[in-house]
Amino acid sequence: MNGAETLLRTLVNSGLDTCFMNPGTSEMQFVAAADKQNDLRCVLGLFEGIVSGAADGYGRMAGKPAATLLHLGPGLANALANFHNAQRAATPIVNIVGDHATYHKQFDAPLASNVSAYASPVSGWIKEIESPADVPQLTQEAVQASLQAPGQIATLIVPADTAWNESVNPASGLISRPDIDKSDAAAISEAAAALRSGEPTVMLIKGHALSEDGLAFASRIAGKFNVRVYFDTFTARVERGAGRAAPERLPYFPELIVETLAGTRHLIVVGSKPPVGFFAYPDKPSWLTPEDCEVHTLARPDQDGLDALQRLAQSLGVDQQAATLMEYKKLDLPQGDLNPETIGMAVAALLPENAIVAEEAITSGFALMPMSVCSPAHDWLMVPGGAIGGGMPMATGAAIACPDRKVLNLQADGSAMYTLQALWTQARENLNVTTIIFANREYKILNIEFDRVGAGEQGRIAHDMFSLDQPALDWVKLAGGMGVTAKRVTELDDFCKTLAAYLNEPGPNLIEAVL
């Protein structure tokens, strides 16, 4: 085997089954190697941001890493925004980046770059293969590193000659998931004492503790003690809907978080950290927890938050109590105008059992989530890194990870334009994704932020920088050009009928909801 064949076979032997890729000349050996095996699904993205975003969505839902294959430093650079989101989501990814042959680097070819430097901001582990003989060991190390709690991007740089020269046998055997560190007894006791104090307490949960079981333990604790349960404004995944406990979502704007936490004497964080402002604003605080509030870390992000909640519930004697779970409520379809609120009501009424919601609706998004709390059980994915353009690729990867589940992508039109090539991958792979485009034809969040930062009166140039209607984007044509069925709707009744039809047929399909 050459190095590329050894690398791909080691990935498969280590438990990986999917590789999202956008290869170039230095990765041709990998493409040839893919033809010689049937155990690794290779998915093409027409832009590297699709590759990284899809691997993020896949890893969140599959609970294991996908591989990515990218072309040199510039290809990696194109992928960085959604790798940033994946890093903030703690998603495990094995990121393979081809590079110039070792002997060619001295000539400073036009595409030469410092690949390691590009990878550094988003990677928890980086190594470069120096010899084909090192391929199996370093590939296994990359897989192992990606699974390091809570999950991280492991970047393996592969010079072209180490891919085409003869290597050694691939490593065999599945990679064992590293043991997750558990909270010590002192952290459990400290949180329990805060709860027993009777003083106003907030529990802030993130990561794997937002699973159905983790939220049930939090609900049991909240049922007995003076505690409110929240999750971060943007989190990687939360299991919600009928039959599950329903924590609240922290608001976005800092003054609303300050208002939410006012009077709180104890903040217990589970896999998260105390909230800070998404941005700095004139005359507004960055640290949003009350000054007289004690912060108690029940579990760090790299620790087992689910185990910590269970042990806390046991120490408080509530682990066997009934949790407060949402009951399914059949909702009527809304009436009135087409707007984010009525769209949210329609989604809540029509959402299928066990659906996956991939949400990047930006300003339209905050009206959506509360309405589906009593819908059938589902998973909700967000863009925790805040780098826009994550929604469509995230939905793509989630659909590949869970082919038996419907994926609903709630998508702002401005951010969708960053990665609309994901629609092409959805069509090529016959993915069961329904996309709703919230077509307000502006960067509405920037209009809001312009006022909030006190930038002054908005003139013509500022208005034009936030407007998407000169010309208006035509999402029916854009989707059609990617091979995706699409329809534009302007009336609520038409939207409800179209959504009901699209959710009950295989995707991909798309609704452009003109707001």
Image (cartoon, helix red, strand yellow):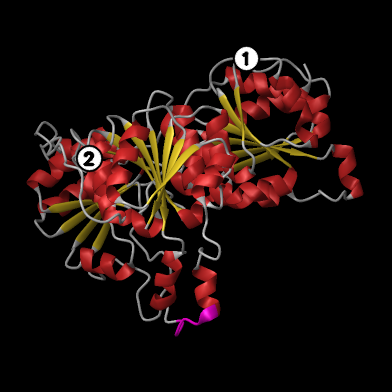
Dot 1 or dot 2, earlier in sequence = 1
Q: Residue, x 55% and y 36% (percent of image)?
A: 93
In depth, the one of 359 and 36 nearer the eye is: 359
Q: Position of residue 512 (x, y in %)?
A: 43, 48
Q: Are marks 1 and 2 in contact (CB under 8 Å)?
A: no
- Given this view, does label 1 or label 2 mark the residue nearer the observer? 2
Q: Residue, x 48% and y 41% (percent of image)?
A: 394
Task: Tell me where residue 366 sits by quadrant.
Answer: bottom left
**Residue 178 visible to the viewer:** no
According to the picture, the residue beneath numbered tag 2 turns out to be 349
**Magenta span covers which residues?**
455-460
According to the picture, the residue beneath numbered tag 1 turns out to be 38
In depth, the one of 346 and 23 nearer the eye is: 346
Q: Amino acid at mark 1?
A: Asn
Q: Position of residue 220 (x, y in %)?
A: 13, 40
In depth, the one of 63 and 365 nearer the eye is: 365
